[in-house]
Image (cartoon, grey):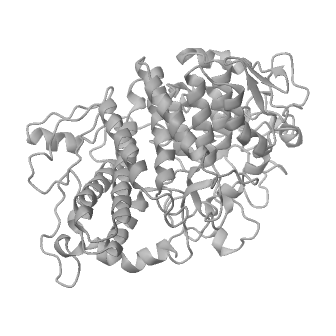
Amino acid sequence: MRKLIIKSKLKLAVLALSMATLTFNCSDYLDTPPQDIFTDDNFWTSENNVRTFSWLNYDTFLGYGNNAGTTADFYFHNSSNLDDNLAMNVFTNFATTANATNANWNSYYTLIRRSNLMLERVPTVPMDDAKKKHYLGVAKFFRAFTYFRLAQEFGDVPYTDMYLTQGDPNVYKPALSRAEVIDNVIKDLEEATTLLLNIDDKNTTVNKYTAYALLSRVCLYEGTNRKYNTGQNGNEYLQKAKAAALAVMDNSAYSLKPDWQSLYNSVELLDNPEVILAKRYIQGTLANSIQAYTNTSTIQSGLTKFAAESYVTKNGLPIKQVGGNAEYLGDDNIANTFANRDPRFGKAFGTQDYAYSDKPWNGLTSITGYVFKLYNNPALSGPEVTTIGQNHIDAPIFTLSEVYLNYAEAAAELGSISNADLDASLNKVRARAGIATLTTDGTNVLANGVQIEDPQRVSALEQITGIVSPIIWEIRRERRIEFMSWTSMRKADILRWKKGDYLDTTSNPDVVLGARIPELIGTASKTKVTADGYVIPYASGVVRQFVSPKNYLTAIPTNDISLYEAEGVVLKQNPGW
């Protein structure tokens, strides 16, 4: 059963429940719906209606974006979704002033209100008890997922677990602290794991293990965020992250698929055993544009020098290993750059030649010279690849590989990671990739018996916000490489580790440099390079400053601050805004 096709047929019925899509800024809707469509009073009568209502919740997963849109979890950037892996094809800076409105703020509270409505109405619907519990678990999952993103983005936020009607005095309440919101998120997810079915419609809808995967993500976030951003002990959350990850790892239904790239270029992820939840795209129903933006004359966003140098060689050693790395051949040309490197490097980016404005490759150009090919599928061609809004490869939302790396990072942060832990998690990801696995004494790390000593770990950039142990460093590197184009995940990681300076062009000039093309040195090429030959993607003098603590959170929309103030409630603006 193809959920998206069915959803499109039944969407009018769900949209009729307009009262479920109101946001906390009290937008007005028509009070009297047409008589030939459902209302809140006559809708909650069957399991099919509940299922239909729940399907709209899945729109919150961005995946590769919707149709021609570029609001996505992968590849695309904007001022609130910058990372240090990809340089956008147009220089992008942080917002400097607070906006009156924020699309995420509004859409998140819309989904929360829908979830609260489900939690109130589902108990009254005549259906099998197991299914009733399942849909209560679905509602708790989406409420948790949405409050988690609100807390990540905005910090302290208004919180309610009730379905509120217009004029309810509880609509305007003081914000709850970020920590309390996260605790409520964890409570919802823990309850969801006891309510949800083990499997429901393969990996296209939420089940028990989707909740465990999100729980591991949330608890890892909270444990590390407390440690690095607030100076608090986050061990309680790290233990929960490990336990939640282990619940997924112990399920034999999930396993890593040998082809890493298939996570990102498959027409269907339904039968991929690594995928816990996917966003489906089907021609004629819902599409995306991620292949079109990386396979046409549009200048590609490109890999940064900072990210490219994080790829190790196949022996598991960093390219700047203290004492040398014989497998690394330097970066004088593209062949040497990719030689003996982590195979994921060459699967994500083209190895034939660099492409830039003076010298396109197969009609493609990249802002940094590195040609993106991760999303290419050899079985697809023509308009379904090159037309904006016509791409239909599926997007991963939760994967076993993320769960493995959540487990490894939590264990390392707890100071208790063992070789058995590595073999059960991170080493499976590395073995699939084709690079040497790791051993550890809990602090130091070895690859093929050689102790890893990466000078970047103790560089001036790392000293700005604190040097981490070698094992945590290597786990973070693995997470970066495994999810190189997963922009939203990388941004969240940078912020929870308090590494905002990675995005600062003064502290980290390599974040706005690209491939090394030495033949351009001293030429009149339109593509400018440094004295060493590294591509300079943007105009001279552009600067992006990461301001702490301001840029660790997004501004609260000023319109909402005014709305709360009019009701006698103070909604505080975030620091620096």
On the rendered structure, is 447 left or right of 189? right
Nearer to the camera, 367 or 200: 200
Residue 65 appears in the figure: yes
- Residue 332 placed where, x, y %? 87, 34
Q: Residue at x 68, y 20 (%)?
A: 470
In the displayed structure, 543 sits above or below 358; it is above
Left-right relation of 471 to 545: right
Q: Position of residue 239 (x, y in %)?
A: 49, 29
In depth, the one of 109 and 191 nearer the eye is 191
Residue 544 visible to an observer of this rendering: no
- Residue projecting furthest to the front: 129
Taking the view exactly as shown, the residue that stands out farthest to the bottom is: 36
Question: Looking at this view, is 418 or 319 the one in front?
Answer: 418
- In the depicted structure, whether residue 175 falls above or below residue 45: above
Q: Residue at x 49, y 29 (%)?
A: 238
The image position of residue 466, as x and y in percent, is 55, 16
Which residue is at the front of the view, 266 or 270? 270
Q: Is residue 400 above or below residue 439?
A: below
Q: Is residue 191 above or below residue 7?
A: above
Q: The C terminus lies in which quarter of the figure?
A: top left
